[in-house]
Amino acid sequence: MIGGKSLEFGFTSHSYVRYSPNDLGAQLGVLIGLVFDARAETRRIVLSKVVGEEVPVRKEHELSERERRFRRLRGEATAVGVSPDRAVRVKQSGPNGWQVSINPGIADSLSEAEFLTAFSRALSDVMGRYRDEVARARATVYGDDDLKRYR
């Protein structure tokens, strides 16, 4: 993660060509989930340091009805991003559900650098689409005035 805004992926020497598309997709899906879980935990830790006391993750029973509804809608949100060459597809279901699909034969047709570019573009595409879905959920629950704060 670079500056909290971008991600950089890479492979150990020659490992890219050793993966099947299914295995590589499964590993990348898990990796994305772990990166975003770590990012959320880091935000919570930083916020705790800023306010001077631990900011706990709030349990479902501690939330207002509107917050529960928003979390439910956010959890149901789904988005799909695709690389421009359609070689890589990334699906996000809720905040933590990630799936990566890679066309068969990609290792034979794309270099490691080209694959990483395709994957990064698909990931960027899905993140933008998911952010839009979450914004719609937020507007549904909290109204359009609240939505303006997030644009």
Image (cartoon, rainbow, N blue to C red):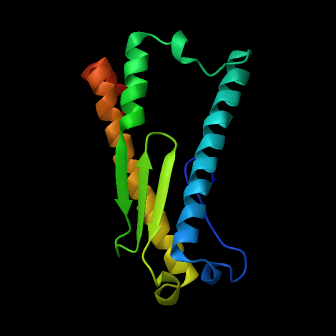
Q: Is residue 58 left or right of residue 105?
A: right
Residue 4's place in the image compared with 107, above or below, is: above
- Please indicate whether residue 116 sits to the left or right of residue 53 in the image: left
Q: Residue at x 37, y 26 (%)?
A: 149
88 w.r.t. 38: above or below: below
Examine the image and state in which quarter residue 26 appears. bottom right
Q: Is residue 3 in view from this perspective?
A: no
- Residue 140 visible in image: yes
Residue 123: horizontal and vertical position, in percent?
Answer: 46, 58
Task: Give the residue displayed 58% in from the left and 70% down from the top.
Answer: 23
* Residue 145 versus residue 12 in the image, above or below: above
- Residue sitting at 52 percent across and 70 percent down? 22
133 lies above or below 10 = above
Q: Residue furthest bottom?
A: 108
Quadrant of residue 13 within the rendered picture: bottom right
In which quadrant will I find the C terminus?
A: top left
Q: Number of callouts in the render?
A: 0
Viewer-side residue, 38 vs 61: 61
Percent from the top left, x then y, of residue 81?
Answer: 37, 58
Q: Closer to the camera, 31 or 144? A: 31
Percent across and percent down for residue 51 are 68, 16
Q: Position of residue 131 (x, y in %)?
A: 38, 42
Residue sitting at x 69%, y 83%: 14
